[in-house]
Image (tube, rainbow, N blue to C red):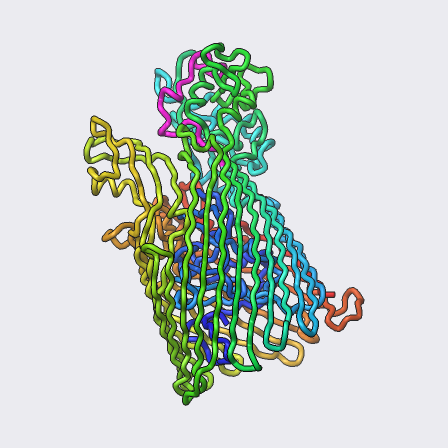
């Protein structure tokens, strides 16, 4: 059982809260994938998942984020074994375990979620808790499952098909499963057409753009033209044509930015897993496991700006000779952004948003229990890799300038060629290019466009190897039972690398920073012990401790103590206290990125400036946490109640040094390079242990089950999480910032954090053998406020309907175990829309709310 490493038959409750999610709960939740189920959990806050509208990262992973302490603060296991991170980081520049890649969901028997710090048993990353995926090792037969979900708005389909086969014999068995997932993209304009136009999801980073003339700034002559609206609707699947692509606002052209912007990726994924076990003898059992996942994704986000604010005025000057220039004078293009992921005159470009992921895992181990004793020796070896290939694009500033002046193209030689002649071509930054055809002077040659905005490639890999040995045994009799003990040792080696294409290393991109190759590795040795002492029949004490050493400054000893008291049979009182630690991800330690930052006012020069930034890793101390939990469980006559008060004090969180804080608080720092006039030209931003989080709250669950005669059974379940406090610091000795109820959109450590999350389910099982089921679940996510933009202060309450019927021997196989389960459901039955962020480019907070709207669900499971 997750939460204890002692396998000696102790059946007393744990001192830490453990939540079990059964297979029936997983299949009955109207969710096609494990990741979709994760984001409905009340224990998650700001859980990273595959919604893409505001993601500034290359990751498409879905990860647990218990207590909002970060995706790397929840340790993810499969059958008790640690899993490998993705190579591509999420929004906080932190890698994570992608739960969608672990296994086919049909392979999951249950989830065991330990809601308490557990580094004393499991090591680093077990700060907020542990999630353990337990597989269906003893499955026999053949079972297929399919699930189809369709969004009412936009027609987005999520489809999954999977199968599991298992055979068990006297000495062993094997189980194999495979799953295929396909997900269509969905777009903000499909779901929020009225909001996009009326609530200001707009930007002046636009095409059509604005131009500075001798008379001042003016919008593109075609700004607001219906011809562009029709073109966009024809070429791009995310634009409906109901709203204009652009509007005139004074002297600027404004793009309805959210049009064509996807809030989830186009996705296909294949998962497969095999697990086998064999009893060599009555006391020695071996097991073997293999898993593979392959994912392919395409994003639908806007193309990068081609005249970002830090692009020089000279680089954006459009000469009179440019075919698109209708002003009759030299003008300056401002805030250009390629429409339709490139240029519509050359069709849709897929390059800026492609991601490929591949995952592979092997595990082998044994259980040795000699002479039918309670002594158990367990050994496991795991090796896993995760690969990613990211493709995107950006504009090269010097190429931008050359193309505006007629010297664009891969074969153009400015020294020998003539503007717009032969191999040298113009790039037309005006909207007239969108309506032009090949051969027209205003038309943009596809080769010039591709040369101007080349494809950038990142090839990443993470690798994990672990070897573990755990022994557990009863020691001697105590008044309440046998004293149980466990000791264990583990060796762990992990590596990370990121190789980039040569063009990615070029320093002259206008939007993205220069990338460089980076790699690093580390290993760790650790040892732990655990004791569980039943002092009385009603009272158990437990103590555990683990030492883990990565070398250098990264080492930690973490103790944990707990107590369980059962004053009466139906009531259990629990308490635990312990410390935990987290190591920075390898990309934080070894990664380097060269970009640019805007300085508001430099104390030395008194001026605003744009400065080159070098984000680099380095040696840091462990990120340390102290936590305690006090809880109670009560069960009586079909009624159950669980409540837990939890508290975490998480310090020394590693983040990148903030450039604005550095230049304002220490303008003469050696990390700031200045030229002869004192102007800052470069800032080095190392990773430092600077942030901290203090948080506490309450979880409570209620349940009631009763029979309604011989043919019906009623079940009521509620699960609620309340965050009382979440205060964080962005810098050492900095001010405490309240994070509860906020998006925390500019924070380097805090995630979006609703104060309340709740799931409330009423289910009726009825018919002979309770073959039919109807369930209604109400889901509550309280408001999160955007500090940068006006937000609608409203809770998000949705209702899901789930109906199922179990039909025995439907296909006539004759097997007594044969049955078919047919499922129908509606998610967000009343089509509730999430709270708005007025004036934001992102419309709503997708890490707290699901913006899909009403979604119809059909499913079928058949066991032969």
- Percent coordinates x, y for residue 468 in the rendering: 48, 65
Residue 490 as seen in the image, left or right of residue 623 = right
Q: Is residue 744 visible?
A: yes
- Percent coordinates x, y for residue 565 in the rendering: 40, 82
Residue at figure coordinates x 40%, y 12% from the top left: 329
**646 shown above or below 439:** below
Residue at figure coordinates x 39%, y 18% from the top left: 317
Residue 617 as seen in the image, left or right of residue 3 = left
Q: Quadrant of residue 775?
A: bottom right
- Percent coordinates x, y for residue 461 in the rendering: 50, 46
Q: Is residue 220 magenta-colored?
A: no
Q: Quadrant of residue 666?
A: top left
**182 shown above or below 370:** above
Q: Which residues are magenta?
A: 302-327
Residue at the bottom extreme of this rendering: 479
- Quadrant of the drawing holding the C terminus: bottom right
Q: Is residue 317 magenta-colored?
A: yes
**513 shown above or below 102:** above
Residue 655 as seen in the image, left or right of residue 178 = left
Number of marks drawn: 0
Assign the magenta stretch its main secondary structure.
Answer: loop
């Amino acid at each position: 059982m997750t939460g204890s490493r002692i396998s000696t038959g102790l059946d007393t409750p744990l001192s830490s809260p453990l939540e079990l999610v059964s297979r029936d709960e997983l299949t009955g939740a109207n969710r096609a994938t494990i990741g979709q189920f994760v984001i409905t959990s009340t224990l998650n806050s700001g859980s990273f998942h595959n919604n893409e509208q505001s993601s500034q990262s290359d990751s498409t992973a879905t990860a647990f984020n218990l207590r909002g302490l970060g995706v790397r603060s929840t340790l993810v296991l499969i059958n008790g074994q640690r899993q490998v991170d993705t190579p591509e980081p999420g929004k906080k520049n932190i890698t994570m375990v992608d739960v969608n890649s672990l296994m086919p969901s049909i392979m999951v028997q249950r989830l065991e979620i330990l809601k308490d710090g557990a580094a004393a048993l499991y090591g680093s990353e077990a700060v907020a808790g542990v999630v353990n995926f337990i597989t269906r090792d003893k499955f026999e037969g053949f079972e297929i499952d399919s699930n189809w979900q369709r969004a009412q708005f936009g027609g987005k389909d999520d489809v999954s098909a999977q199968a599991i086969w298992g055979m068990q014999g006297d000495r062993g068995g094997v189980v194999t499963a495979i799953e295929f997932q396909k997900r269509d993209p969905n777009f903000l304009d499909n779901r929020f057409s009225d909001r996009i136009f009326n609530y200001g999801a707009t930007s002046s980073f636009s095409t059509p753009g604005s131009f500075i003339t001798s008379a001042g700034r003016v919008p593109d002559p075609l700004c607001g033209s219906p011809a562009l609206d029709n073109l966009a609707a024809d070429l791009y699947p995310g634009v409906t044509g109901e709203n204009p692509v652009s509007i005139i606002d004074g002297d600027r052209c404004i793009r309805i930015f959210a049009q064509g912007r996807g809030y989830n990726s186009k996705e296909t994924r294949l998962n497969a897993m095999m697990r086998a076990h064999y009893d060599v003898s009555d006391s020695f059992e071996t097991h073997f496991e293999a898993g593979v996942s392959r994912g392919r994704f395409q994003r639908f986000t806007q193309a990068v700006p081609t005249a970002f604010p830090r692009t020089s005025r000279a680089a954006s000057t459009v000469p009179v000779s440019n075919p698109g220039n209708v002003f009759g004078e030299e003008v300056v293009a401002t805030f250009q952004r390629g429409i339709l992921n490139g240029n519509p005159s050359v069709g849709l470009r897929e390059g800026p948003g492609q991601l490929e992921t591949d995952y592979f895992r092997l595990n082998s181990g044994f259980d040795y229990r000699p002479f039918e004793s309670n002594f158990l020796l367990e050994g496991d070896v795991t090796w896993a890799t995760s690969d990613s290939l990211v493709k995107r694009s950006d504009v090269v500033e010097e190429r931008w300038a050359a193309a505006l002046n007629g010297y664009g193209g891969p074969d153009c030689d400015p020294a020998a060629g003539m503007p717009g002649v032969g191999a040298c071509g113009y790039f037309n930054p005006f909207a007239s290019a969108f309506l032009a055809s090949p051969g027209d002077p205003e038309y943009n040659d596809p080769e010039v466009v591709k040369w101007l905005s080349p494809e950038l490639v990142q090839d990443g890999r993470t690798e994990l190897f672990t070897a573990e040995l755990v022994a557990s045994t009863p020691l001697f009799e105590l008044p309440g039972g046998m004293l149980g003990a466990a000791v264990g040792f583990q060796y762990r080696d992990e590596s990370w690398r990121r190789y980039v294409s040569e063009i990615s290393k070029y320093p002259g991109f206008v939007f993205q920073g220069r990338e460089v190759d980076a790699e690093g590795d580390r290993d760790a040795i650790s040892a732990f012990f655990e004791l569980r002492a039943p002092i009385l029949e009603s009272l158990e004490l437990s103590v555990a401790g683990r030492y883990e050493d990565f070398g250098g400054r990264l080492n930690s000893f973490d103790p944990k103590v707990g107590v369980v008291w059962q004053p009466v049979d139906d009531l259990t009182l629990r308490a635990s206290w312990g410390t935990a630690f987290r190591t920075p991800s390898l990309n934080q330690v070894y990664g380097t990125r060269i970009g640019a930052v805007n300085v508001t006012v430099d104390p030395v020069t008194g001026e605003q400036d744009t400065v080159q930034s070098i984000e680099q890793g380095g040696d840091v101390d462990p990120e340390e946490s102290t936590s305690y939990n006090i809880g109670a469980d009560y069960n009586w006559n079909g009624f159950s109640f669980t409540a837990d008060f939890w508290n975490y004090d998480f310090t020394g969180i590693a983040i990148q040094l903030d450039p604005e804080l550095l230049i304002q608080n220490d303008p003469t720092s050696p990390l700031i390079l200045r030229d002869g006039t004192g102007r800052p030209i470069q800032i080095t931003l190392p990773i430092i242990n600077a942030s901290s989080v203090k948080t506490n709250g309450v979880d409570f669950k209620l349940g009631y089950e009763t029979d309604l005669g011989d043919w019906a059974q009623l079940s009521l379940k509620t699960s609620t999480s309340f965050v009382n406090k979440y205060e964080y610091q962005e810098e050492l000795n900095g001010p405490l910032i309240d994070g509860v109820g906020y998006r925390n959109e500019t924070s380097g450590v805090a995630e979006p954090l609703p104060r309340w999350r709740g799931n409330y389910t009423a289910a009726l099982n009825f018919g002979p053998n309770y073959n039919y089921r109807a369930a209604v679940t109400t889901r509550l996510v309280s408001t999160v406020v955007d500090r940068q933009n006006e937000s609608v202060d409203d809770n998000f309450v949705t209702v899901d309907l789930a109906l199922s019927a179990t039909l025995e021997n439907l296909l006539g196989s004759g097997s007594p175990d044969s049955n078919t389960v047919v499922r129908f459901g509606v998610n967000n039955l009343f089509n509730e829309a999430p709270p708005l962020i007025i004036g934001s480019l992102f419309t709503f907070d997708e890490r707290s709310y699901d913006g899909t709207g009403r979604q119809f669900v059909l499913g079928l499971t058949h066991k032969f």
